[in-house]
Image (spheres, rainbow, N blue to C red):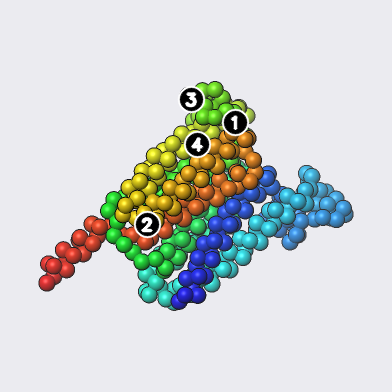
Amino acid sequence: MKFLRILLWFTVVWTFCLAMLGAYVRLSDAGLGCPDWPGCYGRITPPEQQHEIAHAEKHFGGEVDPAKGWKEMVHRYCVGGLSLLLLAALILTARHRRELNVNVPMLLAPVAVIVFQALLGMWTVTLKLMPIVVTSHLIGGLTLLATITLIASRASLSQQALSGRSWVWLALVVVIAQIVLGGWVSSNYAGLACDGFPACRGSFAPPPGLLDALHPDRQLGLTASGAPLTIDHLAAIHWLHRLGALVVLAVVGGLAWRLRRIQPRWAKLLGLALVVQLTLGIVNAVYSLPLPAAVAHNGGAGLLVVLLTALLASTRSENTDAQSHAQYSFAR
C-alpha cells in the first residue's frame, strides 16, 4: 500500500511538471513546432538533416525549426509516459479502492480527462492555436492534476472536520476562474499588452473592446467578425486578469487567515503559495514576461490547485459529522 501511495504522488508530480512543460512550449512559441499530429512532419522525431528539412518544407510548407519541433515532441512523449503511468496507478488503486477511500467515479475522471486532452492537443495543431482550444488544453491539464491529486490525497491523508469548508470550495472556484483568464491572456499573446504596473497603459479603467476580446468563437488574432484584434483588445484581456488577481488575493488570503488557528500548516502553505504566485505575476508585468518567471507563474497556479484540492480531500464538513451523529442517536 505504501508503494501505491508513492506511485500516486509521483503521478501528481509528473502531471505538475508536464503542465509546466506545456507552458514552456506555449510561451517559447513552439506550439506549432510540429504542424501535424501525433508525429512531427510525418516522423517520430523532428527533421534535423538538411535533406530532411527540405523534404518537410516541400510537403508541409513553411519553415522548419528543429528546436521548436523537439520541444513539442518531448512534450508529446511526456504525455505518453504520463498515460502509461496513470493507467498503472489507477489499476492498482482500483484493486484497493475500499481501503483507500476512493470510489469508481474518481478513478474514471482522470481517464476521461486525458482522452479529452489528447483530442485538444490534436485540435491545438489542426486549428492553428485557436485561443479557446489552447485555453481549454491548459484547463484540461490542470483538471487532470486536480483529479489525480484528489485520488492521492484520499488515499494518503486522514480526513478531519473543518468548519466553513465552503470557503475552500469558493477559493478553488476563484483560482480556476483566474487560471482560465490567465490561459486566455497567454493563448491570445496578451502578456505584454499592458505596459506599466499597477495601472494598465496608464489607466485603471478597462480598455475598450473587452467583450469582443472575450468572444470564444474566433481565430487567433481576430475578432469574431474577422477583423484584426487591436492592442486595446489585448490590453482588455490582460486588465481583466489583473482584476482577477485581486479577487484571488482576497478569497485565498481570507481562507489562509481563517485557517491560521484551526489548520496552521495549511494556512502557511496557502499563504506562501499565494505570495509567490502574486510576486511572479508582478515580476512578469514589470520585467516584460521573462520566460522563467512566466513558466513559474503557470507552476504557481498548478500549486494552488494542488493545495486546495488536497485540502478539500483531507477535510469534511462539521455539518456532516453532526448529521451522522444525529442519525446514530436516532437509530439507538
Q: CA distance from mark 4 to mark 2?
A: 25 Å
Q: CA distance from mark 1 to mark 2?
A: 36 Å
Q: Residue at x 49, y 35 (%)?
A: 242
Callout 4, which amino acid?
His
The answer to whether mark 3 and mark 4 are in CB contact below 8 A is: no
Is residue 238 depicted above or below 177 in this figure? above
Image quadrant where residue 285 sits: top right
Helix, strand or loop for disc 1: loop
Q: CA distance from mark 1 to mark 3?
A: 14 Å
Helix, strand or loop for disc 3: loop
The answer to whether mark 1 and mark 4 are in CB contact below 8 A is: no
Q: CA distance from mark 3 to mark 4?
A: 13 Å
Residue 115 percent location from the top left of the image = 54, 60
Disc with the residue nearer the chain's start (1 vs 2): 1
Res 204 label: 3
Q: Which residue is mark 1?
A: 193
Residue 185 percent location from the top left of the image = 56, 38
Callout 3, which amino acid?
Phe
The answer to which of 31 and 324 lies nearer the viewer is 324
Disc with the residue nearer the chain's start (4 vs 2): 4
On the rendered image, what quadrant is the C terminus found in? Answer: bottom left
The answer to which of 193 and 263 lies nearer the viewer is 263
Q: Which residue is mark 2?
A: 312
Image quadrant where residue 129 sits: top right
Helix, strand or loop for disc 4: helix
Helix, strand or loop for disc 2: helix
